[in-house]
Image (tube, rainbow, N blue to C red):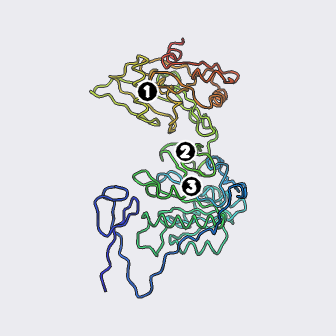
Amino acid sequence: MPRPKSRFICSQCGYESPRWLGRCPECESWNSLEEAAPAVETGAAEKKLKRRPGAGGEIMRIDDVPESDLMRFTTGVEELDRVLGGGAVEGSLVLVGGDPGIGKSTLLTQLSVNVAHAGKNVLYVAGEESARQVKMRARRIAGESNGFYILPETDMQAVMRHVEKNRFDCLIVDSIQTMYRPDMASAPGSVSQVRECASEWMRYAKETGAAVFLVGHVTKEGAIAGPRVLEHLVDAVLYFEGDRQHQYRLLRAAKNRFGSVNELGMFEMTDRGMRGVPGASEALLSERAHGQSGSAVLCALEGSRAVLTDVQALVSGTIIGNPRRMANGVDPGRLFMLLAVLEKRAGVQLYNQDVYVNIAGGLEIDEPAADLAVMAAVASSARNRVIDAATAVMGEVGLAGEVRAIPQAERRLVECARMGFTKAILPKGNLRSLRVPEGINARGVETAAEALSVMLNGR
Protein backbone atom coordinates (compact mmCIF):
# COMPACT_ATOMS: atom_id res chain seq x y z
CA MET A 1 0.00 0.00 0.00
CA PRO A 2 1.49 3.39 -0.95
CA ARG A 3 2.62 5.64 1.82
CA PRO A 4 0.14 8.46 2.57
CA LYS A 5 1.35 11.82 1.34
CA SER A 6 1.60 14.85 3.54
CA ARG A 7 -0.14 18.10 2.72
CA PHE A 8 0.88 21.64 3.54
CA ILE A 9 -1.92 24.08 4.38
CA CYS A 10 -1.57 27.85 4.66
CA SER A 11 -2.59 29.02 8.11
CA GLN A 12 -3.63 32.39 6.67
CA CYS A 13 -5.93 31.50 3.78
CA GLY A 14 -6.25 27.69 3.73
CA TYR A 15 -4.32 27.13 0.47
CA GLU A 16 -3.18 23.51 0.11
CA SER A 17 0.08 22.38 -1.50
CA PRO A 18 1.68 18.93 -1.89
CA ARG A 19 5.04 20.41 -0.84
CA TRP A 20 6.29 23.10 1.46
CA LEU A 21 6.62 26.62 0.06
CA GLY A 22 8.26 29.59 1.66
CA ARG A 23 5.56 31.93 0.36
CA CYS A 24 1.90 31.14 -0.13
CA PRO A 25 0.88 31.64 -3.80
CA GLU A 26 -2.68 32.58 -2.77
CA CYS A 27 -2.28 35.22 -0.03
CA GLU A 28 1.47 35.86 -0.52
CA SER A 29 2.25 35.47 3.20
CA TRP A 30 5.67 34.15 4.20
CA ASN A 31 6.31 30.96 6.26
CA SER A 32 2.60 30.29 6.67
CA LEU A 33 2.40 26.75 5.21
CA GLU A 34 2.16 24.09 7.89
CA GLU A 35 2.25 20.34 7.45
CA ALA A 36 -1.08 18.58 7.98
CA ALA A 37 -1.47 15.00 9.08
CA PRO A 38 -1.87 12.64 6.11
CA ALA A 39 -5.25 11.04 5.61
CA VAL A 40 -5.35 7.40 6.69
CA GLU A 41 -6.38 5.00 3.91
CA THR A 42 -9.00 2.41 4.83
CA GLY A 43 -10.72 -0.35 2.97
CA ALA A 44 -14.09 1.33 3.31
CA ALA A 45 -15.39 3.65 0.67
CA GLU A 46 -14.47 7.27 1.21
CA LYS A 47 -17.19 9.18 2.97
CA LYS A 48 -18.20 12.31 1.11
CA LEU A 49 -18.31 15.53 3.03
CA LYS A 50 -21.74 16.76 3.82
CA ARG A 51 -22.45 19.85 1.78
CA ARG A 52 -24.83 22.58 2.71
CA PRO A 53 -28.17 21.91 0.99
CA GLY A 54 -29.60 24.51 -1.34
CA ALA A 55 -32.56 26.62 -0.34
CA GLY A 56 -34.66 25.45 -3.27
CA GLY A 57 -35.47 29.01 -4.24
CA GLU A 58 -36.98 30.22 -7.49
CA ILE A 59 -36.51 33.37 -9.53
CA MET A 60 -38.99 36.10 -8.63
CA ARG A 61 -39.37 39.80 -9.15
CA ILE A 62 -38.28 42.00 -6.28
CA ASP A 63 -41.83 43.38 -6.05
CA ASP A 64 -43.13 39.85 -5.39
CA VAL A 65 -40.75 39.16 -2.49
CA PRO A 66 -42.85 39.05 0.70
CA GLU A 67 -41.98 41.66 3.30
CA SER A 68 -41.46 40.68 6.91
CA ASP A 69 -40.16 42.57 9.91
CA LEU A 70 -37.07 41.33 11.69
CA MET A 71 -37.94 39.27 14.75
CA ARG A 72 -35.74 40.50 17.58
CA PHE A 73 -35.49 39.64 21.23
CA THR A 74 -33.69 41.56 23.95
CA THR A 75 -30.48 40.16 25.40
CA GLY A 76 -31.10 41.79 28.76
CA VAL A 77 -27.91 43.85 28.31
CA GLU A 78 -28.89 47.34 27.17
CA GLU A 79 -25.49 48.29 25.74
CA LEU A 80 -25.29 45.03 23.76
CA ASP A 81 -28.79 45.58 22.38
CA ARG A 82 -27.73 49.05 21.25
CA VAL A 83 -24.74 47.73 19.28
CA LEU A 84 -26.81 44.92 17.73
CA GLY A 85 -29.35 47.45 16.48
CA GLY A 86 -32.13 46.86 19.00
CA GLY A 87 -31.59 43.27 20.13
CA ALA A 88 -30.58 39.87 18.78
CA VAL A 89 -32.19 38.83 15.50
CA GLU A 90 -33.66 35.35 15.18
CA GLY A 91 -31.70 33.22 12.73
CA SER A 92 -28.61 35.44 12.86
CA LEU A 93 -24.97 34.41 13.27
CA VAL A 94 -22.91 36.86 15.34
CA LEU A 95 -19.14 36.76 15.84
CA VAL A 96 -17.83 38.31 19.07
CA GLY A 97 -14.08 38.90 19.12
CA GLY A 98 -11.51 40.43 21.40
CA ASP A 99 -8.26 39.88 23.26
CA PRO A 100 -8.02 37.13 25.90
CA GLY A 101 -9.50 38.19 29.23
CA ILE A 102 -11.34 41.20 27.83
CA GLY A 103 -14.76 39.88 28.98
CA LYS A 104 -16.28 38.00 26.02
CA SER A 105 -17.29 34.90 28.01
CA THR A 106 -18.56 37.02 30.90
CA LEU A 107 -20.79 39.13 28.64
CA LEU A 108 -22.22 36.10 26.80
CA THR A 109 -22.87 34.31 30.08
CA GLN A 110 -24.90 37.32 31.20
CA LEU A 111 -26.75 37.18 27.88
CA SER A 112 -27.50 33.48 28.39
CA VAL A 113 -28.87 33.96 31.91
CA ASN A 114 -31.00 36.97 30.91
CA VAL A 115 -32.48 35.25 27.85
CA ALA A 116 -33.21 32.13 29.91
CA HIS A 117 -34.96 34.23 32.55
CA ALA A 118 -37.14 35.61 29.72
CA GLY A 119 -38.49 32.10 29.04
CA LYS A 120 -36.23 31.02 26.15
CA ASN A 121 -33.98 27.99 25.94
CA VAL A 122 -30.27 28.77 25.71
CA LEU A 123 -27.40 26.34 25.06
CA TYR A 124 -23.84 27.29 26.03
CA VAL A 125 -21.36 25.11 24.10
CA ALA A 126 -18.21 25.28 26.23
CA GLY A 127 -15.17 24.25 24.26
CA GLU A 128 -12.60 25.76 26.61
CA GLU A 129 -14.17 25.38 30.05
CA SER A 130 -15.89 22.68 32.02
CA ALA A 131 -19.57 22.80 32.87
CA ARG A 132 -18.67 23.55 36.50
CA GLN A 133 -16.66 26.61 35.52
CA VAL A 134 -19.52 28.00 33.46
CA LYS A 135 -21.95 27.38 36.32
CA MET A 136 -19.71 29.18 38.80
CA ARG A 137 -19.47 32.21 36.53
CA ALA A 138 -23.24 32.24 35.88
CA ARG A 139 -24.02 31.99 39.59
CA ARG A 140 -21.60 34.83 40.38
CA ILE A 141 -23.01 37.08 37.68
CA ALA A 142 -26.78 36.69 37.65
CA GLY A 143 -27.82 33.38 39.16
CA GLU A 144 -29.16 30.25 37.49
CA SER A 145 -32.17 29.47 35.33
CA ASN A 146 -34.04 26.37 34.19
CA GLY A 147 -33.72 27.35 30.55
CA PHE A 148 -29.91 27.62 30.63
CA TYR A 149 -28.17 24.47 29.31
CA ILE A 150 -24.44 23.72 29.12
CA LEU A 151 -22.69 21.33 26.72
CA PRO A 152 -18.91 20.85 27.26
CA GLU A 153 -18.00 19.46 23.80
CA THR A 154 -15.68 20.30 20.90
CA ASP A 155 -16.67 17.59 18.39
CA MET A 156 -18.87 19.37 15.88
CA GLN A 157 -20.77 16.24 14.86
CA ALA A 158 -21.57 15.41 18.50
CA VAL A 159 -22.73 18.96 19.15
CA MET A 160 -25.02 18.94 16.10
CA ARG A 161 -26.59 15.65 17.21
CA HIS A 162 -27.52 17.26 20.52
CA VAL A 163 -28.87 20.51 19.09
CA GLU A 164 -30.95 18.75 16.42
CA LYS A 165 -32.72 16.70 19.09
CA ASN A 166 -33.66 19.75 21.12
CA ARG A 167 -35.12 23.17 20.32
CA PHE A 168 -32.98 26.13 21.36
CA ASP A 169 -33.73 29.80 20.82
CA CYS A 170 -30.16 30.98 21.39
CA LEU A 171 -26.76 29.26 21.26
CA ILE A 172 -23.34 30.41 22.49
CA VAL A 173 -20.24 28.73 21.06
CA ASP A 174 -17.15 29.49 23.15
CA SER A 175 -14.98 29.39 21.15
CA ILE A 176 -15.15 28.64 17.41
CA GLN A 177 -11.40 27.84 17.36
CA THR A 178 -11.92 24.83 19.63
CA MET A 179 -14.61 23.23 17.45
CA TYR A 180 -13.52 20.60 14.93
CA ARG A 181 -14.95 18.11 12.47
CA PRO A 182 -13.41 14.63 12.79
CA ASP A 183 -13.94 13.91 9.09
CA MET A 184 -11.35 16.55 8.23
CA ALA A 185 -7.62 15.87 8.50
CA SER A 186 -6.63 19.39 9.59
CA ALA A 187 -6.12 20.30 13.23
CA PRO A 188 -8.67 22.21 15.34
CA GLY A 189 -8.26 25.95 14.96
CA SER A 190 -6.95 25.74 11.40
CA VAL A 191 -8.48 27.86 8.67
CA SER A 192 -10.35 24.98 7.06
CA GLN A 193 -11.75 23.70 10.39
CA VAL A 194 -12.91 27.14 11.51
CA ARG A 195 -14.52 27.85 8.14
CA GLU A 196 -16.40 24.53 7.92
CA CYS A 197 -17.60 24.63 11.54
CA ALA A 198 -18.85 28.18 11.12
CA SER A 199 -20.69 27.13 7.94
CA GLU A 200 -22.46 24.42 9.93
CA TRP A 201 -23.58 26.98 12.49
CA MET A 202 -24.77 29.31 9.75
CA ARG A 203 -26.85 26.52 8.22
CA TYR A 204 -28.33 25.68 11.63
CA ALA A 205 -29.19 29.32 12.40
CA LYS A 206 -30.96 29.88 9.07
CA GLU A 207 -32.88 26.60 9.18
CA THR A 208 -34.07 26.78 12.80
CA GLY A 209 -34.29 30.55 13.41
CA ALA A 210 -32.03 30.36 16.46
CA ALA A 211 -29.61 33.20 17.21
CA VAL A 212 -26.05 31.88 17.34
CA PHE A 213 -23.15 33.76 18.95
CA LEU A 214 -19.60 32.62 18.14
CA VAL A 215 -16.65 33.64 20.29
CA GLY A 216 -13.52 34.27 18.25
CA HIS A 217 -10.11 34.96 19.71
CA VAL A 218 -7.94 37.64 18.17
CA THR A 219 -4.77 36.28 16.58
CA LYS A 220 -1.33 37.89 16.88
CA GLU A 221 -1.98 39.63 13.56
CA GLY A 222 -5.07 41.31 15.08
CA ALA A 223 -7.72 39.33 13.15
CA ILE A 224 -10.61 37.37 14.66
CA ALA A 225 -10.32 33.58 14.34
CA GLY A 226 -7.87 33.96 11.49
CA PRO A 227 -7.49 36.75 8.91
CA ARG A 228 -10.96 37.58 7.57
CA VAL A 229 -11.98 33.93 7.58
CA LEU A 230 -15.38 34.41 9.19
CA GLU A 231 -16.16 38.08 8.78
CA HIS A 232 -17.67 37.60 5.32
CA LEU A 233 -19.74 34.62 6.46
CA VAL A 234 -21.43 35.89 9.61
CA ASP A 235 -24.22 38.46 9.89
CA ALA A 236 -22.55 40.67 12.50
CA VAL A 237 -19.03 41.14 13.83
CA LEU A 238 -18.61 42.68 17.29
CA TYR A 239 -15.22 43.79 18.60
CA PHE A 240 -14.45 44.08 22.30
CA GLU A 241 -11.83 46.79 22.82
CA GLY A 242 -9.91 47.95 25.84
CA ASP A 243 -7.16 46.89 28.17
CA ARG A 244 -7.70 44.19 30.76
CA GLN A 245 -6.21 46.57 33.32
CA HIS A 246 -8.48 49.41 32.19
CA GLN A 247 -11.75 50.26 33.88
CA TYR A 248 -13.91 50.51 30.76
CA ARG A 249 -14.43 48.12 27.85
CA LEU A 250 -15.85 49.24 24.51
CA LEU A 251 -18.01 47.15 22.19
CA ARG A 252 -18.22 48.12 18.51
CA ALA A 253 -19.90 46.57 15.47
CA ALA A 254 -17.49 46.21 12.54
CA LYS A 255 -20.26 44.60 10.48
CA ASN A 256 -24.00 44.38 11.03
CA ARG A 257 -26.52 43.28 8.41
CA PHE A 258 -29.41 44.22 10.69
CA GLY A 259 -28.36 47.62 12.00
CA SER A 260 -25.80 50.39 12.10
CA VAL A 261 -22.08 49.68 12.33
CA ASN A 262 -21.35 52.96 14.11
CA GLU A 263 -22.92 52.21 17.47
CA LEU A 264 -20.78 52.07 20.62
CA GLY A 265 -21.42 50.14 23.81
CA MET A 266 -19.49 50.92 26.99
CA PHE A 267 -19.06 48.43 29.83
CA GLU A 268 -17.36 48.35 33.19
CA MET A 269 -16.00 45.08 34.57
CA THR A 270 -17.28 44.42 38.11
CA ASP A 271 -17.47 41.42 40.42
CA ARG A 272 -21.05 40.95 39.15
CA GLY A 273 -20.04 40.83 35.50
CA MET A 274 -20.07 43.44 32.76
CA ARG A 275 -22.09 46.48 33.81
CA GLY A 276 -23.34 48.80 31.08
CA VAL A 277 -22.34 52.47 31.32
CA PRO A 278 -25.23 54.46 29.80
CA GLY A 279 -23.72 57.83 30.76
CA ALA A 280 -20.53 57.58 28.71
CA SER A 281 -19.78 61.31 28.86
CA GLU A 282 -19.98 61.42 32.65
CA ALA A 283 -17.65 58.42 32.93
CA LEU A 284 -15.06 59.76 30.49
CA LEU A 285 -14.94 63.25 32.06
CA SER A 286 -15.18 62.19 35.71
CA GLU A 287 -11.40 62.27 36.29
CA ARG A 288 -10.55 65.23 34.08
CA ALA A 289 -7.82 67.49 35.44
CA HIS A 290 -9.03 71.09 35.76
CA GLY A 291 -6.84 74.14 35.49
CA GLN A 292 -4.14 72.35 33.50
CA SER A 293 -2.85 73.16 30.03
CA GLY A 294 -2.92 70.57 27.25
CA SER A 295 -6.55 69.54 27.72
CA ALA A 296 -9.52 70.09 25.39
CA VAL A 297 -13.00 68.59 25.52
CA LEU A 298 -14.25 67.00 22.30
CA CYS A 299 -17.82 66.01 21.52
CA ALA A 300 -17.42 62.94 19.29
CA LEU A 301 -20.18 61.02 17.55
CA GLU A 302 -20.31 57.25 17.96
CA GLY A 303 -23.24 56.07 15.89
CA SER A 304 -26.36 57.68 17.35
CA ARG A 305 -24.58 58.55 20.59
CA ALA A 306 -22.78 61.84 21.22
CA VAL A 307 -19.89 61.35 23.65
CA LEU A 308 -17.80 63.98 25.42
CA THR A 309 -14.20 62.98 26.03
CA ASP A 310 -10.98 64.60 27.15
CA VAL A 311 -8.26 65.10 24.52
CA GLN A 312 -4.91 65.39 26.29
CA ALA A 313 -1.60 66.61 24.87
CA LEU A 314 1.88 67.05 26.30
CA VAL A 315 4.52 69.12 24.49
CA SER A 316 8.06 69.20 25.89
CA GLY A 317 11.51 70.04 24.59
CA THR A 318 13.39 67.15 23.04
CA ILE A 319 16.97 66.10 23.79
CA ILE A 320 17.37 64.04 20.63
CA GLY A 321 17.69 65.01 17.00
CA ASN A 322 14.33 63.61 15.91
CA PRO A 323 11.48 64.69 18.22
CA ARG A 324 8.99 62.04 19.21
CA ARG A 325 5.38 61.94 18.03
CA MET A 326 3.18 59.48 19.93
CA ALA A 327 -0.61 59.08 19.74
CA ASN A 328 -3.02 56.96 21.75
CA GLY A 329 -6.59 56.85 20.45
CA VAL A 330 -5.82 59.03 17.41
CA ASP A 331 -4.50 58.02 14.00
CA PRO A 332 -0.75 58.83 14.04
CA GLY A 333 -0.81 59.86 10.37
CA ARG A 334 -3.61 62.32 11.08
CA LEU A 335 -1.66 63.70 14.04
CA PHE A 336 1.43 64.32 11.89
CA MET A 337 -0.70 66.27 9.40
CA LEU A 338 -2.30 68.39 12.13
CA LEU A 339 1.09 69.22 13.64
CA ALA A 340 2.29 70.39 10.22
CA VAL A 341 -0.80 72.61 9.87
CA LEU A 342 -0.15 74.02 13.35
CA GLU A 343 3.36 75.06 12.39
CA LYS A 344 2.53 76.38 8.94
CA ARG A 345 -0.85 78.06 9.48
CA ALA A 346 -0.97 78.90 13.21
CA GLY A 347 2.67 79.64 13.97
CA VAL A 348 3.09 77.03 16.73
CA GLN A 349 6.72 75.85 16.49
CA LEU A 350 7.01 72.12 17.20
CA TYR A 351 10.11 71.13 15.22
CA ASN A 352 12.18 70.78 18.42
CA GLN A 353 9.39 69.50 20.68
CA ASP A 354 8.21 66.03 21.67
CA VAL A 355 4.43 65.72 21.23
CA TYR A 356 2.26 63.15 23.02
CA VAL A 357 -1.51 62.95 22.42
CA ASN A 358 -3.94 60.75 24.35
CA ILE A 359 -7.72 60.22 24.28
CA ALA A 360 -8.77 59.64 27.88
CA GLY A 361 -10.84 56.56 28.69
CA GLY A 362 -9.38 54.29 26.01
CA LEU A 363 -11.61 55.63 23.23
CA GLU A 364 -10.50 55.32 19.60
CA ILE A 365 -11.48 58.48 17.72
CA ASP A 366 -11.33 58.21 13.93
CA GLU A 367 -13.69 60.97 12.79
CA PRO A 368 -12.31 64.24 11.30
CA ALA A 369 -14.36 66.29 13.77
CA ALA A 370 -11.64 65.65 16.35
CA ASP A 371 -9.04 67.67 14.40
CA LEU A 372 -9.70 71.02 16.06
CA ALA A 373 -9.72 69.53 19.58
CA VAL A 374 -6.37 67.78 18.98
CA MET A 375 -4.81 71.00 17.66
CA ALA A 376 -6.24 72.98 20.57
CA ALA A 377 -4.81 70.55 23.15
CA VAL A 378 -1.36 70.60 21.51
CA ALA A 379 -1.29 74.40 21.23
CA SER A 380 -2.49 74.74 24.83
CA SER A 381 0.39 72.60 26.08
CA ALA A 382 2.97 74.25 23.80
CA ARG A 383 2.03 77.78 24.95
CA ASN A 384 1.11 76.71 28.51
CA ARG A 385 -2.32 78.33 28.23
CA VAL A 386 -5.36 76.77 29.88
CA ILE A 387 -8.55 76.31 27.85
CA ASP A 388 -11.74 77.24 29.67
CA ALA A 389 -13.13 74.13 31.34
CA ALA A 390 -16.67 74.96 30.19
CA THR A 391 -15.69 74.99 26.49
CA ALA A 392 -16.19 72.11 24.05
CA VAL A 393 -14.28 72.00 20.75
CA MET A 394 -15.16 70.26 17.48
CA GLY A 395 -14.33 70.72 13.82
CA GLU A 396 -12.46 69.29 10.84
CA VAL A 397 -9.27 71.07 9.78
CA GLY A 398 -7.94 71.12 6.21
CA LEU A 399 -4.40 71.55 4.98
CA ALA A 400 -4.96 75.25 4.36
CA GLY A 401 -5.91 75.68 8.01
CA GLU A 402 -9.63 76.11 7.25
CA VAL A 403 -12.22 74.67 9.64
CA ARG A 404 -14.83 72.64 7.80
CA ALA A 405 -18.39 71.78 8.79
CA ILE A 406 -19.08 68.56 10.67
CA PRO A 407 -22.17 66.29 10.64
CA GLN A 408 -24.92 66.38 13.27
CA ALA A 409 -23.59 69.45 15.07
CA GLU A 410 -26.93 70.07 16.80
CA ARG A 411 -26.88 66.64 18.45
CA ARG A 412 -23.37 67.34 19.72
CA LEU A 413 -24.42 70.69 21.18
CA VAL A 414 -27.38 69.11 22.95
CA GLU A 415 -25.00 66.70 24.69
CA CYS A 416 -22.70 69.60 25.62
CA ALA A 417 -25.63 71.48 27.16
CA ARG A 418 -26.72 68.37 29.06
CA MET A 419 -23.25 68.05 30.57
CA GLY A 420 -23.23 71.69 31.71
CA PHE A 421 -20.92 73.20 29.09
CA THR A 422 -21.67 76.84 28.30
CA LYS A 423 -19.34 77.48 25.32
CA ALA A 424 -18.71 75.62 22.09
CA ILE A 425 -16.15 76.25 19.35
CA LEU A 426 -17.32 74.79 16.04
CA PRO A 427 -17.11 75.48 12.29
CA LYS A 428 -18.81 78.65 11.13
CA GLY A 429 -20.48 76.71 8.33
CA ASN A 430 -22.55 74.81 10.89
CA LEU A 431 -24.05 77.96 12.41
CA ARG A 432 -25.96 78.93 9.25
CA SER A 433 -28.74 76.41 9.76
CA LEU A 434 -28.22 75.37 13.37
CA ARG A 435 -30.60 75.66 16.28
CA VAL A 436 -28.35 76.30 19.24
CA PRO A 437 -29.64 74.81 22.53
CA GLU A 438 -30.43 77.18 25.36
CA GLY A 439 -27.49 77.90 27.63
CA ILE A 440 -24.81 77.33 24.97
CA ASN A 441 -22.76 80.19 23.51
CA ALA A 442 -21.71 78.77 20.13
CA ARG A 443 -18.79 80.51 18.46
CA GLY A 444 -18.21 79.79 14.78
CA VAL A 445 -14.66 79.93 13.42
CA GLU A 446 -13.34 79.82 9.87
CA THR A 447 -9.67 78.95 10.48
CA ALA A 448 -7.64 77.03 13.02
CA ALA A 449 -5.66 80.15 13.86
CA GLU A 450 -8.90 81.98 14.73
CA ALA A 451 -10.06 79.10 16.90
CA LEU A 452 -6.78 79.02 18.83
CA SER A 453 -6.92 82.80 19.32
CA VAL A 454 -10.43 82.49 20.81
CA MET A 455 -9.53 79.61 23.14
CA LEU A 456 -6.05 80.65 24.26
CA ASN A 457 -6.23 84.46 24.12
CA GLY A 458 -9.95 85.00 24.71
CA ARG A 459 -10.41 86.92 21.46
Q: Is residue 307 above or below residue 273?
A: above
Nearest to N terminus: mark 1 or mark 3: 3
Nearest to N terminus: mark 3 or mark 2: 3
Instruction: Give the foreground label among 1 and 3.
Output: 1
Q: Is residue 213 left or right of residue 64?
A: left
Q: Amino acid at mark 2?
A: Leu
Q: Secondary structure at mark 3?
A: helix
Q: Which residue is located at x 60 percent, y 67 percent?
A: 204
Label 1 sits on residue: 338
Name the image quarter holding the N terminus: bottom left
Q: Amino acid at mark 1?
A: Leu
Label 3 sits on residue: 106
Q: Mark 1 and 3 residues: CB-CB less than 8 Å, in contact?
A: no
- Observer-nearest of 285 and 370: 370
Q: Is residue 229 left or right of residue 77?
A: left
Q: Mark 2 and 1 residues: CB-CB less than 8 Å, in contact?
A: no
Q: Amino acid at mark 3?
A: Thr
Name the image quarter holding the C terminus: top right
Q: Which residue is located at x 68 percent, y 58 percent?
A: 61
Q: Secondary structure at mark 2?
A: strand
Say which quarter of the image contains residue 235: bottom right
Where does the image place residue 73, in percent across and percent down from the top left?
A: 70, 55
Alpha carbons under labels 2 and 1: distance apart: 27 Å
Label 2 sits on residue: 250
